[in-house]
Image (tube, grey):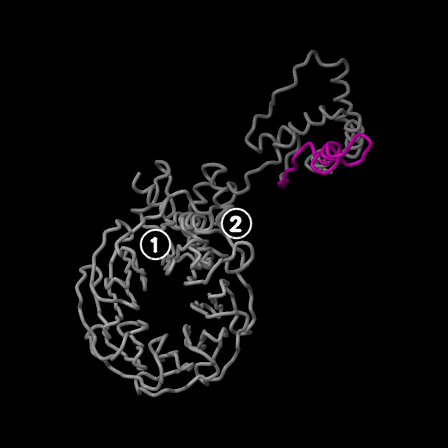
Amino acid sequence: MGFYGTLKLIFYKMKRKLDHGPDGRPFPSGKKHCKGSGLVQATPTTFGDLRLANGHSAQRRRVTLGPPPSGLQEWLHTFQTWSGPERLLALDELIDRCETSQVKHMMQVIEPQFQRDFISLLPKELALYVLTFLAPRDLLQAAQTCRYWRILAEDNLLWREKCREEGISECISPRRRKCVRPGVAVSPWKSAYIRQHCIEHNWRKGDTREPMVLKGHDDHVITCLQFSGDLIVSGSDDNTLKVWSAVTGKVGCCTGGVWCSQMAVATVISGSTDRTLRVWDAESGECVHTLYGHTSTVRCMHLHGNRVVSGSRDTTLRVWDVTTGRCEHVLTGHVAAVRCVQYDGRRVVSGGYDYMVKVWDPETEVCLHTLQGHTNRVYSLQFDGAFVVSGSLDTSIRVWDAETGGCVHTLTGHQSLTSGMELRDNILVSGNADSTVRVWDIRTGQCLHTLQGPNKHQSAVTCLQFCRGLILSSSDDGTVKLWDLRTGAWLRDVVALQSRGSGGVVWRIRASETRLVGAAGSRNGTEETKLLVLDFDVDDKKKETD
């Protein structure tokens, strides 16, 4: 056995003695006296050679507690004359006769020699390959080890791959990067990961900042809410449509009673009690087109590309070109008011007070399927191109095959009107007037979660949003609650009005990756009508301005 094998065995013996009592029995859990270390292959012949190989001086600092014992040199000479197995036997006996403090001293001398920075010894390409196996949070910790590790852990391609694994597709531009210290390059992809991590934390944990409060609709009810980029559009029964800046809070105003709206970038389409649709430029406040054709209130609409489909109490649907303001198609077939509509650019799906759901080819104006099964008014729809999901006052939710018109599943469990739904990747979230939110798998028809318990809503759910693997739900109880989509667990109340439980209502919510906008007020004067804007990217923006 060579020198390294001998040293390794000594190390093991000493560690075992520290981990066990004098009688050989192990110490209780948590009572270990030393911390083990990985071993790296080397070929020194003496301990001094090993120290030199690790970049240390062959001469180490000795214990100076007095003159050396008599006979020490003779004992060492005798030790050197023995064979390898004889030396091991002698050391084994010596260790067994040592006190704990003496073994600790040997550990302190020997253990550092086994602590090798193998990453720094590897070629850069191999070192980076090793780091690819670390999770992003571990990479952030590795960067604090030493300067060279920090340089490696800032590799932009490494962080681009980590961001791809986390679903982050946009990196931070050089203008937005935070300055760390002179001479240290900061990966824009690493900055993107850290920013997204902070945003996620702010969503889930919140912070102490107060939301931006926007007032302008007096004490009227906000009937619709849209949000795109930095622009917020709110419609009210005060006959105004207001455009707000989510950054500055500044407001512009357009007139006209509004029941529904849609928004894409800076284009807003509103549907009114005056039987018209209006196309607005949100930035200038100018009405670009007024769309005439319906003979009663425009109750719903859905925008896709440069086309919007509107549904009215006159029982018809109309397909409009937003650019020209021209009505391209009229879809007739419902025998009562059209309450909800979805349009994916190819098919139109509508639900009405006649208990029917219809699937249309808008180009030919032909009704392809009439989906029958509900026994009361249809109030909400979702359509992903393959499945139609309809929610009704009959308390049921039905899943239909859009191509065949067949009913695939009837989802039961709610006790009242399903007022809103969100569908994404075959996962459906439904909000109901029974104060609960349910999560469904529409492929199996199984209810995955019922969001209730001690932190459930205390009144009807008014609106839902999907965001970042989270569910946001607003309610007549004056709160906006945040839930984990995967587990169904309540995380926190994002909004809680002062008048919650005594008249305060959150009517509508809209969310982006970094912001939440809520329209709140009351029906009894206990809460002012207002918009609440919560920005979960504020920490990052604050640092940019500091």
Residue occupied by mark 1? 525
Asked which quadrant contains residue 231, the reply is bottom left
The region drawn magenta spans 12-41
Relative side of 263 to 494, left or right: left
Q: Report whether 497 appears left or right of 136.
A: left
Residue at the spot x=33%, y=42% of the render?
542
Q: Nearer the viewer, residue 122 or 420?
A: 420
Query: How would you classify the magenta stretch by its main secondary structure?
Result: loop
- Examine the rendered structure and indicate whether residue 15 appears above or below residue 341: above
Q: Nearer the viewer, residue 329 or 84?
A: 329
Residue 431's place in the image compared with 187, above or below, is: below
Q: Residues within 10 Å of mark 2 (few under 14, many from 20)?
A: few
Position of the C terminus, as image quadrant, is: top left
Q: Mark 1 and mark 2 in contact (Cβ < 8 Å)?
A: no
Question: Which quarter shows the N terminus?
Answer: top right
**SS class, disc 2:** loop
Q: What's the residue type where badge 2 is placed?
A: Leu
* Residue extending furthest toward the right: 23
Give the mark toward the camera: 2 or 1.
1
Q: Residue furthest front?
A: 524
Tell me which corner region of the image, top left, top right, bottom left or bottom right, holds residue 379. bottom left
Q: Earlier in the sequence, mark 2 or mark 1?
A: 2
Q: State which quadrant residue 49 falls in.
A: top right
Instruction: Name the residue tied to disc 2.
Output: 134
* Residue 26 locus on image (x, y percent): 77, 36
Label 1, secondary structure: give it.
loop
